[in-house]
Amino acid sequence: MHYKFLIYISYSYALPIGMPLEKEILKRGYSIYWFSDLEAGKKALVDKEHVLDTIEQVCDYGPHIILAATDTVPDFINCLKVQIFHGFNAEKRTFKKDHFRIRGLFDLYCTQGPSTTSVFKSIAKKRRHFDVIETGWSKVDPLFPIVRNRNSDLPTIFIASTFTERLSLAHNDAVFESIKGLANSGKYRFIMVLHPKIPRDIKEKWAGLNNAYFSYRDTTALIPLFREADMMFSDTTSAIQEFGLQEKPIVTFNHYKPKPYLINITSATDIEPAILKALSYPKAILEELKVFNQALHPYTDGKSSARVIEATIAFLHKDKSYLKNKPLNLMRKYKIRKTLNHFTLKSFNRPFTLPKSAS
């Protein structure tokens, strides 16, 4: 049977999530297109093949399965709607507004590991309008097998920051001055990436530190940079969990919910002492990280994308009569139509099932 997939995004950071899925789908000979509901994502897709520019084109394409690296998805397209997530659970907000927020639009959640699967399954049991399958996360497929690409004899520190201003080290002047001093000392090598949604003036400020020991990279391709680094310095971003899968030490600045596998500090004056502690590869902390990784994402085979495709196709054909209708969600559905400038009364609230005899 020939299946039609759509990867649905909003921002450029979703490209590394979708690309391993695209590769797997094409390898199997199925159809795949990309679509972004926001201009920021459309710009990121300019150089890609297999892109649909308008929601009308999406409707005409008629996907069987939408893989969404977004929080919402159009209810007026009659297909299987799958949440594949745009990050790990960064724990930046309260429970009701964080990773586990249910918006009543998806039929299936492809979860990343036991720590999130257990919560989503508990919610699914209560709500009964979606199902949950643990597959691992496509974005980290290229991270495995873990390899170290050392490009410098100096200790290399990867820096990343969340776009949430109240939690962002990138907005902190004291942190900036401290890193500036360390970058000018010649004792360390820094690689920095900032979230695409961080204001341009903040990005330009940090890019101004570029020298032989500090390199600001405007990219969403993080895995090659992870491999270069001996450790990470960050705040409260889901990139922490991605980096941590390598079992390398992580220093955080004012983490919203400090964890035993992190070296958390609250003052910019503690940055270098914390870096030195991390570079000693403290055994107890790395053991905590190993335990955390097993719950977060135990899959190290680089085949999560394959599991997503297999799980969604199987679920596409599964009898879903045990599931309830999705909630009405009138305000959310109106906002989706407004964003897409596509106003229709169509709304498909039953989970989509494709008979195996269909072509």
Image (cartoon, rainbow, N blue to C red):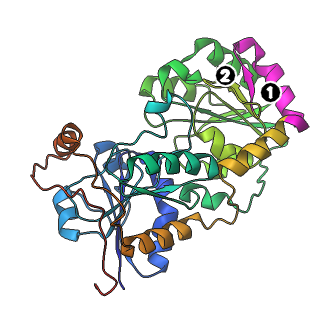
Secondary structure category for the residue under label 1: helix
Determine the residue positioned at 44% across, 74% down.
314
The residues bearing labels 2 and 1 have C-alpha atoms spaced at a distance of 11 Å
Q: Position of residue 280 (x, y in %)?
A: 90, 34
Secondary structure category for the residue under label 2: strand
Q: Is residue 202 left or right of residue 272?
A: left
Name above or below for residue 280 compared with residue 326: above
Q: Label 1 amino acid?
A: Ile
Name above or below for residue 17 compared with residue 283: below
Q: Position of residue 264 (x, y in %)?
A: 73, 23
Q: Position of residue 120 (x, y in %)?
A: 50, 48
Disc 1 marks which residue? Answer: 275
Which contiguous range is marked in magenta?
262-284
Q: Are marks 2 and 1 in contact (CB under 8 Å)?
A: no
Labelled disc at residue 253: 2
Determine the residue positioned at 43% across, 28% down.
200
Q: Label 2 amino acid?
A: Phe
Determine the residue positioned at 53% across, 29% down.
92
Secondary structure mostly seen in the magenta stretch? helix
Quadrant location of the C terminus in the rendered image: bottom left
